[in-house]
Amino acid sequence: MIKPRFLFKKIEPYFNSPEAVIITGMRRTGKTTLMNAIYQKIESDNKIFMDLENPLNRKYLEEENYERIKNSFEFLGVDFTGRAFIFLDEIQLVKNLPSVVKYFIDHYQTKFFLTGSASFYLKNLFTESLAGRKYIFELFPLSFSEFLLFKESLFKLPEYPSEITEAIFDTIAPLYEEYIAFGGFPQVVLKTAYAEKKKALEEIFSSFFQLEVVQLGDFRKNEVIRDLMLLLMQRLGSMLDIQKIAKEMEISRPTTEEYLSFLENTYFIKRIRPFSMGKDSEIRKMAKVYICDTGLANHFAKLDRGPLFENSVFQNMRLKGGLNYYQRKSGGEIDFILDKKTAYEVKIMPDISDIRKTERLAGELNLQDFKIVAKNYTKLQGIVYGFML
């Protein structure tokens, strides 16, 4: 049985649109599984699913004459006299794929569903040839709500913090602790033994490094990127001093920026830019860094629970909109600002002074609202728990 992903509902309205639907994201987030769920949902017999990791399937699409590709599709059972639905998995492995897709959309009104790693875009293979002919959707590791579905939990999360009693909190807490410790990669969540989860995390890291960095990255010093990945996992929520990192890694600043851009475009990290109102007192230049999944960071960096909790909050907040952070040289800070409207300050165990500080700072920034995100149970008013995001 295919486990549900919330992104499915966002894609569903585009099942019959003329544009290609592209699902991208880091490896092992479940793109192929989601594509299979869509394939099963499409009520048509005129459809085909091709895994482009299979060299033979790639060969069908590598013809210079696109009518010969049409002949291959017809050989495989596609009927172009009616609406055809073509599903292609791992499109970054076929360099001419965008122009092929454009040709069949324009000439045969073919509906495409495609998956590809972010390296595909990083390598400039996906050009403007599909401008106006595609919708791109990003798939991330599981949110906590999706995690509960994968764990087949029977309870429903309360909608408001005031509804959470200490007993309800104690029921949710062990699952949330597991989510923070091992993250949201589907294959890790579905493992039952901790040793198996750890092995799966190691395999995900190895797969990303071999397939993204080594095979598609085309860098001269792959081991430097590996060491940079490990370094960044130790600095969750910290501001990135690129000059300092370059010195530590013994590489140039431009090379450091190139590697960081690569890791961001392949979804391994995310840099959060500062929220600025143009005040000289703000720290405006440095971004803060977060990792795609707390499970990887916890396994490879062995961090304190504070940074891991903050990274877990980031994982769920990024699904809601654009994120910034705010920090003054004087020390006032807000961990996340969502869509430049709402402040979120993350605390393991908040107290009343945290609420007052955040309320005051949010007001000075003219933000519409603020929230304190707590990990531990509290009777304070005006907070939200991390598992509710």
Image (cartoon, rainbow, N blue to C red):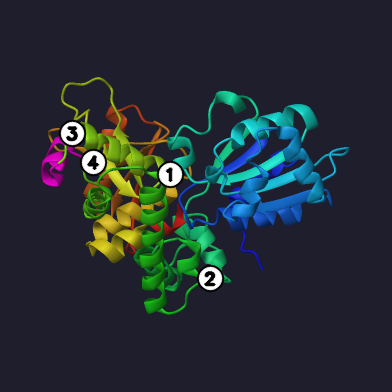
Secondary structure that dominates the magenta span: helix
Q: Which residue is mark 3?
A: 253
The residue under the point 18% across, 33% down is 253
Q: Residue furthest right?
A: 81
Q: Is residue 293 left or right of residue 359?
A: right
Q: Which residue is mark 4?
A: 357
Query: Which residue lies under the disc numbered 2?
Result: 151
The three-letter code of the residue at mark 4 reads: Lys
Check if mark 1's residue and mark 3's residue have beta carbons within 8 Å. Answer: no
Tell us which disc is closer to us: 3 or 2: 3
What's under tag 1, amino acid-wise? Arg
- Whichever of labels 1 and 3 marks the residue nearer the N terminus, that label is 3
Q: CA distance from mark 4 to mark 2?
A: 37 Å
- For image coordinates 65% across by 51% down, the residue present is 57
Q: Judge by depth and name the residue closer to the eye, 86 or 56.
A: 56
The amino acid marked with disc number 3 is: Arg
Q: Quick one: label 4 or label 3, which is nearer the N terminus? A: 3
Residue found 53% across the figure and 33% down from its top: 126
Find residue 318 and name its label. 1
Q: Earlier in the sequence, mark 4 or mark 2?
A: 2
- The boundaries of the magenta stretch are 239-250
Q: Residues within 10 Å of mark 1 (few under 14, many from 20)?
A: some
Using residue 150 as the reference point, say whether residue 192 is left or right of it: left
Label 3 vs label 2: CA separation? 44 Å
Image location of residue 228, percent across then percent down = 23, 49
Alpha carbons under labels 4 and 3: distance apart: 37 Å
Residues tagged 4 and 1 counted as in contact (Cβ below 8 A): no
Give the mark nearer the N terminus: 2 vs 1. Answer: 2
Q: Quadrant of residue 318?
A: top left
Q: Nearer the viewer, mark 4 or mark 1?
A: 1
Q: Which mark is residue 384?
A: none
